[in-house]
Amino acid sequence: MTKINSRAKGQSGEREVIHILREELGIEATRNLDQWRDGGSDILGLAGWAIEVKRAKTPLLKSWWEQTVRQAGTSKTPVLWYRLDRKHWRVVLPLHSITKDFGLRTELEWTVETTPEVFCALVREEISETTQWNSQTQ
């Protein structure tokens, strides 16, 4: 069995996530090719969201989530996509992304883990609400 380079595994994961986002949302998401030099999230093109992508054999959710929050800064909502070997993609996002009743807490204990399909449904809903609000204010 060939040992997989972790960097190549990460890049492959980013491409998989981009494919899902393009298929589900019809957006032109791209890999952040300057992330090693300038920092920032792994995926660009989804306004308001800072997407971090992880592929691994075993989960390191706490450290992954901490990195995701750091990369998001204060202007974007952190979202972690991860896939363990031979498993399906999972998405972790702050609870306040679903309901504003919980405030802007970003600790791992205040997150929700879901599927890519549910994440994309949330994004579509957010886009729909923004579009409706913009058309009403013009």
Image: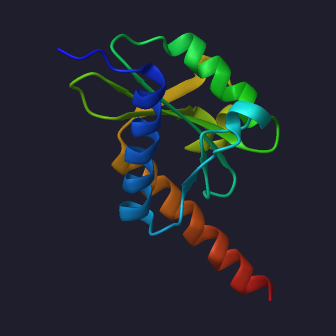
Compared across the picture, whether 106 is left or right of 14 comes to right
Compared across the picture, whether 96 is left or right of 55 comes to right
At x 41%, y 37%, the residue is: 13
Q: Quadrant of residue 82?
A: top left
Q: Quadrant of residue 52?
A: top right
At x 44%, y 64%, the residue is: 25
Colouring convention used in this rendered image of the protein: rainbow
Residue 73: give x, y in percent of width and height.
79, 34
Work out which quarter of the rendered image holds the N terminus and state it: top left
Which residue is nearer to you in this view: 59 or 12? Answer: 12
At x 70%, y 75%, the residue is: 133
Which residue is nearer to you in this view: 102 or 111? Answer: 111
Residue 21: give x, y in percent of width and height.
44, 56
Answer yes or no: is residue 51 visible. Answer: yes
Answer yes or no: is residue 109 visible. Answer: no
At x 60%, y 33%, the residue is: 94
| In the rendered image, the vertical position of residue 106 relative to residue 76, given as above or below | above
User: Exactly how many numbered labels are in the figure?
Assistant: 0
| In the rendered image, the vertical position of residue 69 relative to residue 24, given as above or below | above
Q: Residue furthest toward the bottom?
A: 138
Q: Quadrant of residue 12?
A: top left
Q: Residue furthest toward the left?
A: 1
Residue 95: give x, y in percent of width and height.
57, 33
Q: Residue furthest toward the front?
A: 2
Residue 38: give x, y in percent of width and height.
79, 36
| In the rendered image, the vertical position of residue 6 relative to residue 39, given as above or below | above
Work out which quarter of the rendered image holds the C terminus and state it: bottom right
